[in-house]
Image (cartoon, rainbow, N blue to C red):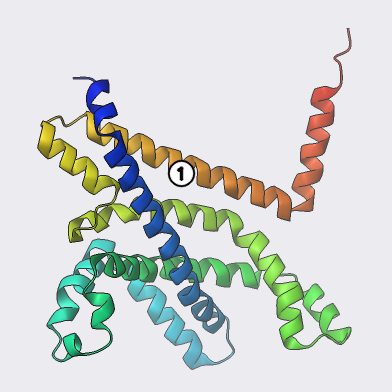
Amino acid sequence: MIMDLDTAIAYLPGLLWGALVTLELTLATLVVGMFIAVPVALCRNARSTLARWLAIVFVFLFRGAPLLALLYMIYYGLPEVPGLKESWAWVILSRPFLCAVLALSLNSAGYLSEIIAGAMRLVPRGEIEAATAAGYRRLAVLRHVIVPHTVRLALRSYGNEIVFVIKGTSVASLVTVRELLANANQIYFNTFDPITPYLAAGLLYLVLVFIVLQAIAFAERRLSPELRIRSRIGDRQAARPARP
């Protein structure tokens, strides 16, 4: 059995709508995950033993826990806690989309905090000491020295994490979020065609991943002077006529 183009074209709007929901899930997860990961990364590199151990426990729990189990615990488990439905948290836990974002963000923050903490440890100590000796305060050193280096060093790993988040959004279909995979499942239930909807959904996932990888590669070239120089040299060599 091969892909049915008529079915793919007929249900393409639904798949594109699901891809849009997947993109919304991804962007929300990246924003919330970053807000969680940055403090954890700072604690991971802190001088305080307590702060480091709290960060280690966070990373161990949310990086090691299966994403599906974490989502089920948030969506099905937390509402059973007495008094929670009468609290402000019920505004989040009563909505499948927000529950999915919370689960994905906690899982992503477990990985992202280690990426950020590792990149911060790779910042050249000489530049930090030079900025301190020049009279920069701690926040100025963080802003002008540590953050730019951390962004550049963590960018490629962050791109991989974005790809993992895009693929991880597929679990949201199990809590009634109509993202890309959920729409592909619905098409399968309507047509009993197991090839066309999932193949089309897979192609849309590949398109999203390709766009992300290209954007990360562009950002990496812009933030890395050596890559820009190497690219210009390659362009000049390609434009140079070959010798007979």
30 left or right of 18?
right
Q: Residue furthest top?
A: 244
- The residue shown at (65%, 67%) is 150
| Three-letter amino acid code of the residue under disc 1 | Val
Q: Quadrant of residue 99?
A: bottom left
222 left or right of 184?
right
Residue 180, given in percent of the width and then of the height, sits at 29, 46
Compared to residue 4, the image places residue 35 above or below, namely below
Quarter of the rendering occupied by the C terminus: top right
Residue 43 appearing in the image: yes
Compared to residue 67, the image places residue 58 above or below, namely below
Mark 1: give few (<14), some (14-19) or many (20+) Cα within 10 Å: some
Question: What is the secondary structure assignment of the residue under circle 1?
Answer: helix
36 left or right of 15?
right
Compared to residue 21, the image places residue 116 above or below, namely below
- The residue shown at (59%, 50%) is 216
Residue 3 appearing in the image: no
- The residue shown at (70%, 48%) is 221
- The residue shown at (49%, 89%) is 51
